[in-house]
Image (spheres, grey):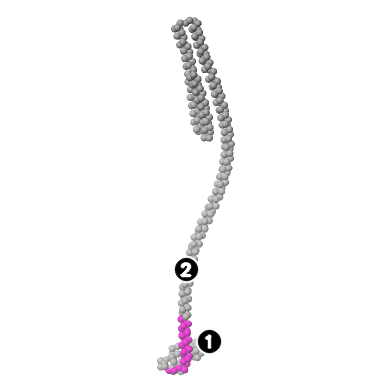
Amino acid sequence: MGTWRERALPGKTRTRPVETCKTGGSGLPLSPNNRGILHPVRPPHLRGRNCPGAPDLHLAAELGKTLLERNKELEESLQQMYSTNEEQVQEIEYLTKQLDTLRHVNEQHAKVYEQLDLAARDLELTNQKLVLESKAAQQKIHGLTETIERLQTQVEELQAQVEQLRDLEHLRDAFRLHSSSLELGPRPLEQENERLQTLVGVLRSQHGAGVRHAGVQTSRPVSRDSSWRDLRGSEEGQGEAKAGEKSLSQHVEAVDKRLEQSQPEYKALFKEIFSRIQKTKADISATKVKTHSSK
């Protein structure tokens, strides 16, 4: 006696009966083509009996063992796939984070580029302003150069005028010295000659008239008085000369004060001119003093 079950095999659409052994074996159903799946359907009272399909049973056991091993391999491969999938997920997460970081860095770079563009525009505007200022400065330099050239020509002209004035000053000083020497030379001699002539005339008149000794004594003070008047006149002339020299020195000091307010390049020149004038005046005054002392 046996039971039938239906099973769809791969590549087959029909069903095959499965027979159960009555005596011996393990009491498991077998397929006629050794392709069936083991089903524990043997009743307990049939255990221990011999089954005529024992080789098929062994084949089915080996097939089941192979299927179990295959199932284990599939489970292991599935676990590997799971682990690989997890690794890929982690890698995707890592790459996602890297992508976010790169996006953030890219945004920062974009901001930096914008700032650099603004700075470049500002620098360009500044460069244009500097170019305009440089052109204006060049024009100013050109104008100042022309002004300096004009001033140099004026300075040269003024130097030539100063040289002419210096020559004229030397000529004037020489003329003054010559005129003063002519004025101071003959006058003291003439005055001395006149004074001696008057004294000789007085003595002759006194000797010829036979004036007494007292009269002679009275006549001498008269002559002394005349010489004293000459001496006083000469002293008054010296006082007038000193007053003139004092006014001249005051005038020179005023000119020096005006020179201090003038340009510095001509200050030394005019000081030299006036120092020479003062020296000349001092020489003239010394000559006058010598002539009066010789009297």
Mark 1 crowd level (few <14, some 14–19, many ≥20, 10 Å Cα): few
- Secondary structure at numbered mark 1: loop
On the image, numbered disc 2 is attached to which residue?
Answer: 94
Q: Is residue 209 above or below residue 242?
A: above
Mark 2 crowd level (few <14, some 14–19, many ≥20, 10 Å Cα): few
Which disc number belongs to residue 87? none
Our reading of the magenta stretch's main secondary structure is helix
Q: Which residue is drawn at the image coordinates 53% and 35% (left, top)?
A: 265
Q: Which residues are magenta?
A: 49-72
Residue 217 appears at what percent x and percent y? 45, 9
Residue 136 appears at what percent x and percent y? 56, 45
Q: CA distance from mark 2 to mark 1?
A: 49 Å
Q: Earlier in the sequence, mark 2 or mark 1?
A: 1
For the image, the number of numbered tags is 2
Is residue 259 among what the camera can see? yes
Does the CB distance between marks 2 and 1 fall below 8 Å?
no
Is residue 276 found inside the magenta-colored segment of the image?
A: no
Residue 7 appears at what percent x and percent y? 49, 87
Q: Which residue is drawn at the image coordinates 57% and 26% (left, top)?
A: 171
Closer to us: mark 2 or mark 1?
Answer: 2
Q: Is residue 157 above or below residue 56?
A: above
Which residue of the protein is positioned furthest toward the left in this rendering?
A: 45
Which disc number belongs to residue 12? 1
Q: Is residue 67 above or below residue 217?
A: below
Residue 174 position by quadrant: top right
Residue 218 position by quadrant: top left
> What's the amino acid at mark 2?
Tyr
- Secondary structure at numbered mark 2: helix
> What's the amino acid at mark 1?
Lys
Is residue 55 found inside the magenta-colored segment of the image?
A: yes
